[in-house]
Amino acid sequence: MSGAAPPAEVGEVRDAHRFDVKRLEAYAREAVDGFTGTLEVRQFSAGQSNPTFLLTETNKTGTKRYVMRKKPPGVLLASAHQVDREYRVMKALADTDVPVPHMYALCEDDSVIGTAFYIMEYLDGRVFTDATIPGTSGEERKALYDNLAMNLARLHAVDYKKVGLSDFGRPGNYFERQIGRWIKQYRGAQTTDVPSMEALIKYLPEHIPDEQAVTIAHGDYRIGNVMFHPTEPRMIAVLDWELCTIGHPLADVAYNCMYDLMGVAGNAPAIDRATMPGLPTVEEHVANYCRYAGRDRIENFNFYLAFSMFRLASISQGVYKRGLDGNASSERAMTLGDACATLANAAWDLVQKDDR
């Protein structure tokens, strides 16, 4: 997570992620417009991939807060933790109707704090870590998810070439490339045999739908990776763009449904909609997205769901492996030992039901 968070989610910088604050101060004075003071650094507890920090500047006129995202320490998997891509896509979207924080500076010089990082605007808003959004009314819950669908459609409507992202990824053949990438990532982090992962590795490349839409694809679009206005069901920022590329819009739609509305992600409990009025079903959320995107329907949606589960299974395995190696951004990494198998089993069950 990046952007704002409640104070309870911010604590001391973890030992594995400490760096020279004075060197960061010196860099900020040169690179961040208006920065003249000294820094206090705290670390957000959320964020499994790239460590995220709250920077509080104290200067002659008061205080100002920023957010910093950096690569984790240690040996990293190929093509992972690309904070430069996060920075670039949010900067490119600054003048679109997709809400993003203001970007201040990107530093790719490892000599400053040990890894690449960027500094962005701190926003005051709400980030919901529970997809069922407890404590809200059914009306507000429905409005929040409707806004989530609307902003995803807005992202997919952006002309990536016009905002300077024509070289941000290879257009076309998205699923072929993604399946290959996540197989490679999974093999690089594999710690045990998971039969359903092996089955998916064989099945998915052979069953890719024909639709070849090309848009900006966020890659991790879900309720926990966006920020809403403090009191209104209105999004003020889309966050966590590490996995963004030029890709296929339906990968984002399926991932959002899988992660937030199906109860299969991570250690999420089963969703009881009887106690959560306003929480859409997968079908309702897809219909909302289609309405905003100007689509009639989505064919072969179970393939996209299975792919999303497979992809998250690979990501979860990578996070767990970093936890074993002592390089994880959060202590929660060590709780994900069963996540890969759980997701892969759910995906394979979905595939088999679809085939039947």
Image (spheres, rainbow, N blue to C red):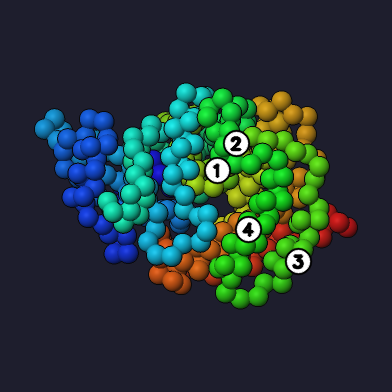
In space, the residues marked 1 and 2 are separated at their CA atoms by 7 Å
Instruction: Tell me the residue that label 2 is attached to.
Output: 216
Amino acid under label 1?
A: Cys
**Residue drawn where x is 51% and y is 24% of the image:** 96
Position of residue 44 in the picture relative to residue 264 (left or right):
left
Query: Which sits in the foreground, 287 or 209?
Result: 209
Secondary structure beneath dot 2 equals: strand
Of marks 1 and 3, which one's residue comes earlier in the chain?
3
Of marks 4 and 1, which one's residue comes earlier in the chain?
4
Quarter of the picture holding the C terminus: bottom right
* Category of crowding for the residue at label 4, using alpha-carbon neighbours closer than 10 angstroms: few (below 14), some (14–19), many (at least 20): some
* Category of crowding for the residue at label 2, using alpha-carbon neighbours closer than 10 angstroms: few (below 14), some (14–19), many (at least 20): many
Residue 214 in the image: x percent, y percent? Answer: 68, 35
78 to 338, vertically: above or below: above
In space, the residues marked 1 and 3 are separated at their CA atoms by 27 Å
Res 199 label: 3
Q: Residue 161's quadrant in the figure?
A: top right
Position of residue 269 in the picture relative to residue 171 (left or right):
left
Residue 332 in the image: x percent, y percent? Answer: 44, 63
Instruction: Tell me the residue that label 4 is attached to.
Output: 182
In space, the residues marked 3 and 2 are separated at their CA atoms by 29 Å
Q: Badges 4 and 2: C-beta atoms under 8 Å apart?
A: no
Q: Badges 4 and 1: C-beta atoms under 8 Å apart?
A: no
**Residue drawn where x is 78% and y is 60% of the image:** 203
Q: Nearer the viewer, mark 1 or mark 3?
A: 1
Amino acid under label 3?
A: Ala
Q: Badges 1 and 3: C-beta atoms under 8 Å apart?
A: no
114 to 1, vertically: above or below: below
Residue 21 seen in this snapshot: yes
Instruction: Tell me the residue that label 1 is attached to.
Output: 244
